[in-house]
Amino acid sequence: MKKDVKYESELNKLLSDYQLHYQNLRSLHWNIKGENFFELHVKYEEWYTRTAEIIDELAERLLTLEMQPISTFSGYLKASEIKELTITHDGKKGVEYVLTTQKTLLDQEKIVLSMASAINDEGTSALMSDLIREKEKEKWMLKAWLNK
């Protein structure tokens, strides 16, 4: 595959978005308080564990394509649309953050999917399709939890 700088940049943006999301989920996990503590403490851990798996898949996909994954926090901060979350104790606000961030990730996954499809990158297309399907289902669940 011919090196495509724009494609590499969009893949790295997605990787960076996931890195910031991962850290934000860790913060939510550590700082949750209130009546939903037990439920959300476990759920945040589930989400950040899955996010760590996705981060590894994305970085390894970049390497498979002979591209360089961003691997510094300064690089992630520069490339990511997702920003650092302030300390949040409120469960509802935390779940609203997750719902909003899932949309940001989903939008970027669709960009990458479109680019991957255009250049017949089946491996990345399959990965994006799986992530998109996962986000769509999660959106339904998050909205149900929030009673939206």
Image: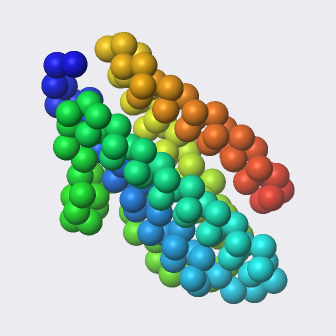
- The structure residue drawn at horizontal position 16% and vertical position 19%, both measured from the top left corner, is 2
- The structure residue drawn at horizontal position 19% and vertical position 25%, both measured from the top left corner, is 4
Res. 114 visible in picture? no
* 23 versus 148 height, above or below: below
The colour scheme applied to this rendered structure is rainbow
Horizontal arrangement in the rendering, residue 34 relative to residue 27 (left or right): right
Q: Quadrant of residue 95?
A: bottom right
65 and 93: which is toward the camera: 65
Find residue 81 and report its horizontal and vertical position in percent: 37, 52
* 90 versus 117 height, above or below: below
72 and 60: which is toward the camera: 60
Q: Quadrant of residue 60?
A: top left
Horizontal arrangement in the rendering, residue 66 relative to residue 18 (left or right): left
Q: Quadrant of the N terminus?
A: top left
Horizontal arrangement in the rendering, residue 120 relative to residue 102 (left or right): left
* 76 versus 68 height, above or below: below
- The structure residue drawn at horizontal position 26% and vertical position 39%, both measured from the top left corner, is 63
* 137 versus 129 height, above or below: below
Res. 96 visible in picture? yes
- The structure residue drawn at horizontal position 36% and vertical position 19%, both measured from the top left corner, is 121
Find residue 89 and report its horizontal and vertical position in percent: 62, 82
Find residue 124 and report its horizontal and vertical position in percent: 41, 28
Find residue 78 and report its horizontal and vertical position in percent: 23, 57
What count of labels does the image hold? 0
